[in-house]
Image (cartoon, rainbow, N blue to C red):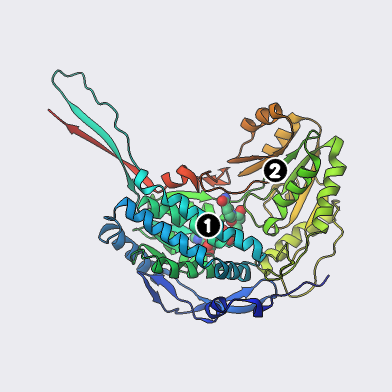
């Protein structure tokens, strides 16, 4: 199977100019030239098309100091909440204005189909708009304080205060969206930020830095340092002036980040990996369940933290659903992100392609059956054909480990209890989908699923007002919603003797 490559002549002139530019770090409102660089690779053909700066401890230190100054001594800490709201709205408007350029950059850098990139850019702007509504609504509590001493009068209340400098570390799978999930609530809370985007997809964050400056957000409030996780990422986690680390990425890296952050007792939010189950009951709308289960795993080529990578189907409709999802997968158009026909792009890099292919090969060698019929693509891009596998066991690595690719394991169950037990038999606890027309069944299952999010009769999508995050080895803390904002605030108690 031969696959399309990106036609760069399709790019807008602003995108072309951006990728040809040399990129530095955005620190204290200025661009700091790159000392050394990392190639930016187009995952659709394996060729370098741009370069980003490879920052390390020095650049991180400069960025953290700028953020620290802006928080403690700059105009940010004293800015009125309504002014913070206006700046966030201004940033959202600029993201929407430049949506096409941001989507093109995202598609080139990550490989995702351009239409999906457009949805993500507008989704990210929506998160900025939602979080812009919070600054003037942040408030504490005023409990009545009465002590049993005659004549004593006390007044007590709580204040909600920004935690300080936030170190935000994000992955490459939906890069702009992930960056804004951190930036928007942190800024709404009144924090300042040093963002370390993923080395495999940093361009949209750098384009965002330009919009931050245009929106009038003061220097030092948002700083962006690109570079490798082991160098720039670890330096950020270890920095003593950083008050909170908000991390999204793999469970393995999250554990390392948590250990490092503990040394200085930083607050930590971890949004980590998943192995999310979809449960299809015989009473489901079958056509809806088949399309939904396919979307749950194949969107963004399976590179979504909440990807529904385990599909459990009631035995009486197992064949129909498993075959249906496989036919859906076989009909998906695999191609480069800028190809208008493309529904599924390449994986992010060669390592990820080989890792995903390795899972498929080992499962087939141990007796799994592929229901999908497509051969693996040829060429230099990092493509993996969507693959649906049956005849796998619950304990297999294919069913237990996060693969982060377009690979679905389908297993049967006999009754509701078994479905719940299989769904919960995982070290992860990020998300789950239930497909059933029975309201009572859905309500029986919902509270028993050990995960942070359950979607019913939909593959689910993030919504700014609804928190996202996991339990168990999928991490702790939440992005989005009121809880997402709360992660960037702490409480100060005030007690006043009035007499
Ligand atoms: P990753 O853990 O390899 O990298 C994530 C980020 O951490 C990158 O910016 C990287 O440079 C940085 N990093 C790497 N090593 C570091 C270290 N030692 N110290 C500090 N920073 C370091 O993850 P990835 O491969 O970029 O992303 C895929 C993973 O992200 C998947 O596991 C996916 O499930 C997860 N994810 C989770 C959510 C969620 O909300 N739970 C959302 C999206 C992605």
Q: Is residue 84 left or right of residue 462?
A: left
Q: Which residue is mark 2?
A: 277
Helix or strand or loop: what does disc 1 sit on? helix
Please determine whether, in this image, residue 52 is positioned above or below residue 143: below
Residue 37, image x, y percentages: 51, 78
Depth check, front residue: 304 or 442 = 442
Image coordinates of residue 361 in percent, x first then y, are 80, 59
Vertical comparison of 22 with 175: above or below = below
Task: Assess disc 2: are there few (<14), some (14-19) or many (≥20) residues with their C-alpha within 10 Å of its C-alpha.
Answer: many
**Residue 79 picture quarter:** bottom left
Q: Quadrant of residue 224?
A: bottom left
Q: How many discs mark residues in the rendered view? A: 2
Ligand 1, by image quadrant, is: bottom right
Drawn side of residue 109 relative to residue 366, left or right: left
Residue 425, labelled with which disc? none
Q: In the rendered image, is residue 427 in sight?
A: no
Q: Which residue is mark 1?
A: 124
Task: Name the residue at 83% across, 46% down.
Answer: 322
The quadrant in which the N terminus is found is bottom right
**Residue at (45%, 72%) from the top-left corner?**
55
Q: How packed is label 1: few (under 14 Cα within 10 Å), some, or many (20 or more)? A: many
Check disc 2 and report its element: helix, strand or loop. Answer: strand
Q: Is residue 102 visible?
A: yes
């Amino acid at each position: 199977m031969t696959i399309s490559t990106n036609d760069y002549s399709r790019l807008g002139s602003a995108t072309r100019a951006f990728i040809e530019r040399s990129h530095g770090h955005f620190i204290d409102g200025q661009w700091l030239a790159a000392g050394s660089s990392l190639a930016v690779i187009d995952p659709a053909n394996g060729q370098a098309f741009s370069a980003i700066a490879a920052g390390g401890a020095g650049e991180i230190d400069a960025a953290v100091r700028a953020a620290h100054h802006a928080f403690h001594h700059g105009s940010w800490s004293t800015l009125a909440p309504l002014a913070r709201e206006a700046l966030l709205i201004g940033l959202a408007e600029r993201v929407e204005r430049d949506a096409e350029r941001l989507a093109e950059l995202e598609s080139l850098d990550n490989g995702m189909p351009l239409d999906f990139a457009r949805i993500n850019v507008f989704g990210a702007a929506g998160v900025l708009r939602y979080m812009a509504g919070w600054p003037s609504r942040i408030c504490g509590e005023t409990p009545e304080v009465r002590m049993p001493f005659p004549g004593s009068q006390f007044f007590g209340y709580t204040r909600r205060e920004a935690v300080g400098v936030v170190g935000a570390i994000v992955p490459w799978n939906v890069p702009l969206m992930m960056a804004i999930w951190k930036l928007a609530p942190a800024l709404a809370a009144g924090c300042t930020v040093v963002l370390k985007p993923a080395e495999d997809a940093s361009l949209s964050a750098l384009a965002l830095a330009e919009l931050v400056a245009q929106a009038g957000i003061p220097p030092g409030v948002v700083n962006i340092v690109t570079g490798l996780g082991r160098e720039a990422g670890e330096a950020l986690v270890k920095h003593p002036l950083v008050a909170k680390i908000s991390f999204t990425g793999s469970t393995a890296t999250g554990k390392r980040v948590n250990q490092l952050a503990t040394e200085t007792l930083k607050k930590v939010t971890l949004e980590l990996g998943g192995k999310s189950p979809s449960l299809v009951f015989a009473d489901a709308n079958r056509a809806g369940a088949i399309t939904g289960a396919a979307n749950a795993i194949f969107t963004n080529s399976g590179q979504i933290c909440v990807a529904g990578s385990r599909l459990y189907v009631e035995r009486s409709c197992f064949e129909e659903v498993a075959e249906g999802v496989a036919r859906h997968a076989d009909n998906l158009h695999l191609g480069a992100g800028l190809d208008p026909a493309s529904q599924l792009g390449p994986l992010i890099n060669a390592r990820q392609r080989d890792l995903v292919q390795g899972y498929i090969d080992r499962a087939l060698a141990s007796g799994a059956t592929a229901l999908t019929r497509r051969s693996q693509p040829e060429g230099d891009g990092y493509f993996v054909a969507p693959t649906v596998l049956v005849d796998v066991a619950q304990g297999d690595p294919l069913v237990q480990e996060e693969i982060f690719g377009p690979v679905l394991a389908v297993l049967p169950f006999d009754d509701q209890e078994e479905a719940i037990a299989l769904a919960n038999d995982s070290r992860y606890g990020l998300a789950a989908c239930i497909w059933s027309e029975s309201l009572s069944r859905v309500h029986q299952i919902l509270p028993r699923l050990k995960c942070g999010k359950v979607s019913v009769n939909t593959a689910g999508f993030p919504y700014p007002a609804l928190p996202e995050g996991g339990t168990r080895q999928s991490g702790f803390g939440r992005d989005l919603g009121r809880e997402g904002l709360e992660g960037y605030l702490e409480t100060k108690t005030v007690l006043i003797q009035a007499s």
